[in-house]
């Protein structure tokens, strides 16, 4: 193993920040524990709070392969664990027949040729347990979109980092991957799966941290504009919108305003650029009704303007 566990929660925060991710203490602690105890980390939270990004940042930090399993309705083990390359197996068999080798070889050895590693297609879960020079990071993204039954596969794989391929035997990871599962909580994930994981609810960042994130991710956006935009999205999150803006929207909005040559907000630019931050007509209407000018006034105050 080339990667040692972090020494402290502070080390985790610093390393994440080095890779452009600003975690609060709760999240940094969960990541520290997941790495130290070698347990999967289950991250739940609203859209755009930075769940998926955690896994990406971890893989850059530990410099291991980044393996992503995107969940969706109907996903099964063939897409998640492994599959046999049927067409290549067939070609192999045809070739054996054409050369007369099939007649000379007994059925059992021909079969074991066909079900050997070379015809195995490794899908993300199996790939993450395969030998690797550095610790892999396995992202199981949006697990709430998969069906109940699919969780059984995950349970087996995550309980002891082992997967059984009937034709080949049991495959156990030499270096357990760092596993991050994310969910938007469109449905509740089974307790059995959660029990194997450390759980953390990812909140929207507080105002100052969001300003720092914008400054980090969009360095050419000036401090006052970053503060004004962060204040606006913070206010919007209190309006009970259908889809409150995430961090990604705050960053996008700041980038858009900078691209338009703005260094300050005013009511009319907010109205014309609202589509970068609110993606539902009803939400835009709601914000307009709340009074954009009042919001801008509050935002200017927060930036000292
Ligand atoms: N704490 C943070 N530090 C730095 N950047 C962040 C942070 N949180 C979010 N971001 C930024 O916000 C973007 C969106 O985050 P991400 O895609 O991880 O959200 P998510 O929680 O997975 O959302 P969804 O539920 O929609 O998939 C990231 O690409 C990143 O640029
Ligand atoms: Mg995500």
Image (cartoon, rainbow, N blue to C red):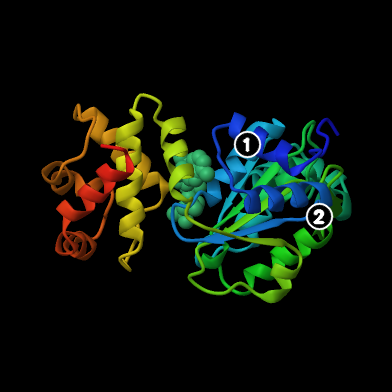
**Image-quadrant location for residue 221:** top left
Query: What is the quadrant of the C terminus in the image?
Result: top left
Q: Residue at x 66, y 39 (%)?
A: 13
Q: Secondary structure at mark 1?
A: helix
**Image-quadrant location for residue 119:** top right
Measured as percent of width and height from the top left, residue 110 is found at: 82, 49
Report the residue marked by disc 1.
16
> What is the CA distance from the residue labelled 1 to the residue labelled 2?
25 Å
Q: Nearer the viewer, residue 89 or 182?
A: 182
Report the residue marked by disc 2.
161
Q: Nearer the viewer, residue 90 or 96?
A: 90
Query: What is the quadrant of the N terminus in the image?
Result: top right
Q: Residue at x 83, y 42 (%)?
A: 175
Q: Residue at x 80, y 31 (%)?
A: 133
Mark 2, other Cα within 10 Å: few <14 / some 14–19 / many ≥20: many
Measured as percent of width and height from the top left, residue 187 is found at: 52, 74
Closer to the chain start, of discs 1 and 2, is 1
Under 8 Å from ligand 1: the CB of mark 1? Answer: yes
- The number of numbered discs placed on residues in the rendered structure image is 2
């Amino acid at each position: 193993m080339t990667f040692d566990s972090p020494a402290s929660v502070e080390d985790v925060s610093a390393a994440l920040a080095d890779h452009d991710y600003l975690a609060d203490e709760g999240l940094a602690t969960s990541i520290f524990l997941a790495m130290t105890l070698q347990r999967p980390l289950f991250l739940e939270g609203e859209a755009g709070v930075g769940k998926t990004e955690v896994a990406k940042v971890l893989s850059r930090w530990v410099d291991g392969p980044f393996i992503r399993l995107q969940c969706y309705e109907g996903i099964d083990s063939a897409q998640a664990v492994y599959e046999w390359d049927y067409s290549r197996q067939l070609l192999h068999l045809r070739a054996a027949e054409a050369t007369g080798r099939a007649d000379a070889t007994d059925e059992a050895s021909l079969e074991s040729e066909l079900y050997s590693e070379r015809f195995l297609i490794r899908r993300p879960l199996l790939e993450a347990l395969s030998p690797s020079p550095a610790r892999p990071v396995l992202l199981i993204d949006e697990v709430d979109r998969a069906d109940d039954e699919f969780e059984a596969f995950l349970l087996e794989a995550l309980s002891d980092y082992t997967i059984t391929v009937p034709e080949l035997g049991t495959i156990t990871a030499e270096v357990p991957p760092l596993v991050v599962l994310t969910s938007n909580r469109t449905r509740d994930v089974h307790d059995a799966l959660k029990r194997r994981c450390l759980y953390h609810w990812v909140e929207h960042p507080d105002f100052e941290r969001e300003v720092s994130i914008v400054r980090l991710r969009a360095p050419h956006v000036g401090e006052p504009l970053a503060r004004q935009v962060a204040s606006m999205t913070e206010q919007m999150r209190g309006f009970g919108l259908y889809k409150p803006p995430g961090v990604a929207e705050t960053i996008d909005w700041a980038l858009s305003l900078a691209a338009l040559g703005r260094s300050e907000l005013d009511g009319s630019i907010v109205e014309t650029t609202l589509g970068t931050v609110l993606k539902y007509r009803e939400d835009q209407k709601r914000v307009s009704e709340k009074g954009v000018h009042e919001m801008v006034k509050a935002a200017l105050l927060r930036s000292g303007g």
